Image (cartoon, rainbow, N blue to C red):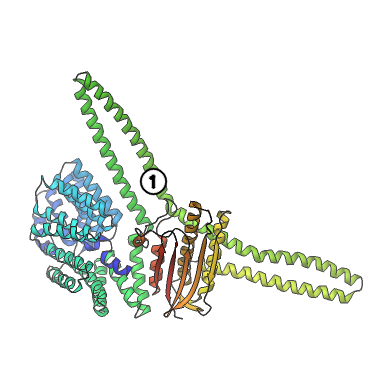
Amino acid sequence: MRILFICILIIGNALLPAYGQHENFKDVPGLLQNLSAATTDTARVMFKSRLAEAYRSNDPDTSLILASEALSGATKLGFKKGEIHALVALCVLAREKGDLPNALELGLKALKMSEEEHLAYEQIYALVRVAIVYISVRDFPKAIDYLEKAESLLKDNPDAFQRFAIHYFLASAYEQSNDLEAAEKQMFEFEKDEPGVVQWIVVSKRLRAYIAVKRNQLPLALQYYRESNVVAIAENGLREVATTSNAMAVAFRKLGQDDSAIYYAKEGLRLGQQLNYTNRIMSASSLLAEIYAEKDPKEAVRYYQIASAAKDSLYGVQKVLQLQSATMKEQERQVEQETTRLAYQNRMKQWALIGGIAVFLVIALILYRNNREKQKTNKVLETTLADLRTTQSQLIHAEKMASLGELTAGIAHEIQNPLNFVNNFSEVNGELIDEANQEIDGGNIGEAKIILNDIRENEQKINHHGKRADAIVKGMLQHSRSSSGVKEPTDINALADEYLRLTYHGLRAKDKSFNAIMKTDYDESVGYINIIPQDIGRVVLNLINNAFYAVNERKEQNSNGYEPTISVSTKKNNGKVEIRVADNGNGISQKVLDKIFQPFFTTKPTGQGTGLGLSLSYDIVKAHGGELKVETKEGVGSEFIIALPNQL
């Protein structure tokens, strides 16, 4: 179901239409004529920006060239208005291609420039663009805040097209955050003011379909999707056709009509690849991987690889850090604006108070004191922002090093045990050889033979424990290497037990005071199943680590009579093999239960987790045709269940 959810709400930019100029691909010939007839450099800049908007639906590469030329020309001319329009065009294109950090930086740059130049129309234009990027990363409160700022500016600059766009994106933000009543209220506003532009008919119908899907009115949703696609196809809007095709595939999947779902998902994938729009590619291939997991595992793996590559492009660590950096820069800019505004207000008040009477002098002293407090607050904010930047750059590195340290400590403990046997038996053999020599010198050949037999037995034990250490090293090299992506028969019981011991010893090496009761219940009939051992091993390691963290957290909160306990078990159930990892920690709050498998969501304190573990684990299990779920009760504990197909 999670992939279905991604397909419906995959990065907001896959669900959002064009905004800004009214052009679409059919307007290209007329705009080209206007460009060739333009008599001024500034007019050529504006026509190139509008052409970039028109080409975006069908030829994003040409759109990028035109927008870049417009920006370069406007910069050379010092034509600020042209720079803003070109930046916004590039912002739109970057978001469509899935480069959200770049899109946010371009949109914020356009917003800052429009504010400095006091260009109200362009400021609204940029505010909406920044809001759409925040919708794309599902930060709906921030998106709504930017859209409401745009709406407040629109009161002094009435424009039917902009008013329609603001209400539409407010509706989209509310729909994606599941506030359907607020979404329909905004839809009433934008349909009332619909400016008659064809592409808005496409997205209006599609938005109604999204709401119908949320209400499980699937036949009605398909009707709206078809009406939207008819207009999009007539207008040759390939981008919109790709988006609607993916959404229709999801609806058919919900109806159990997999053949139709496959047809529309493949159409969405084909158009996404043709346009090189990563978000459409990921939406379609994720759904195809899910469907084929039940029909054709080989095809499922192929589409999972396509989806995985697209997801890495959209959500890679570098992209996330860039997005956080862009967001932080915007926060710093807002702090600077607020500081400047406050400083200006204070100066005006001080000048006014100079000519006042004594009572106003008292007020001036009070304001001065307040100003000093604000300066101290600003210094605290600057220090906090610097700490945030440092923490941000160390976050992923710390997470990796922590996991590596735990595994290394566990491996060291496992290897030390057989090495102790090897060393002990070697020392004993040395003593026995001396005794044998003494017996031979004394002529006691029978006693010497007995000692030699003891030496032989010890050598066999040395050999046995040496091979055991060798097996541990080889096994860990096998589990630590990068995943080959090839499934192979794997002993699930041995894999689960190995990671349980390694994780426990790793935590003990890091914290000698840590202790926990470990219970195991392995079903011997499970045997071997066909999996990618490195990937499933990472899932088991992550769940066991989380379980130890949960019981340790509860122990630190209240140690009276509490015994930290985790259980790892396996069993067959309805044709599947289950791996269960349970703990008696604090459990998971119902408020956050629906979010635990989302990327970058974590309940751990800042710096102790990236929020990627459960998200990646969920995707790995789904790619194996399995399911990862959780059962929890606050104050009692949690149990994570991995259900995998029982196949060899």
Image coordinates of residue 250 in percent, x first then y, are 25, 72
Which residue is at a point 15% across and 51% down the rendered structure image?
A: 45
Residue at point 14% right, 52% down?
46
Work out which residue is located at the far top of the displayed protein and give it: 358
Q: Residue furthest right?
A: 442
- The amino acid type of the residue labelled 1 equals Leu
- Quarter holding residue 192: bottom left
Q: Nearer the viewer, residue 11 or 8?
A: 8
How many residues crowd around disc 1 within 10 Å: few (fewer than 14), some, or many (20 or more)? few
In which quadrant of the rendered image does the N terminus lie? bottom left
Measured as percent of width and height from the top left, residue 88 is found at 20, 52
Q: Position of residue 485 (x, y in %)?
A: 43, 72
- Residue 240 to residue 38: above or below: below
Picture quadrant where residue 132 is located: bottom left
Horizontally, residue 587 falls left or right of residue 409, namely left
**Quick check: can you spot residue 401?**
no
Query: Is 548 drawn above or below residue 368 in the view shown?
Result: below
Viewer-proximal residue among 358 and 21: 358
Q: Secondary structure at mark 1?
A: helix
How many marks can you see?
1
Q: Nearer the viewer, residue 473 or 421?
A: 421
In this rendering, position of residue 53 left or right of residue 594: left
Q: Which residue is mark 1?
A: 388
- Residue 522 visible within the image: yes
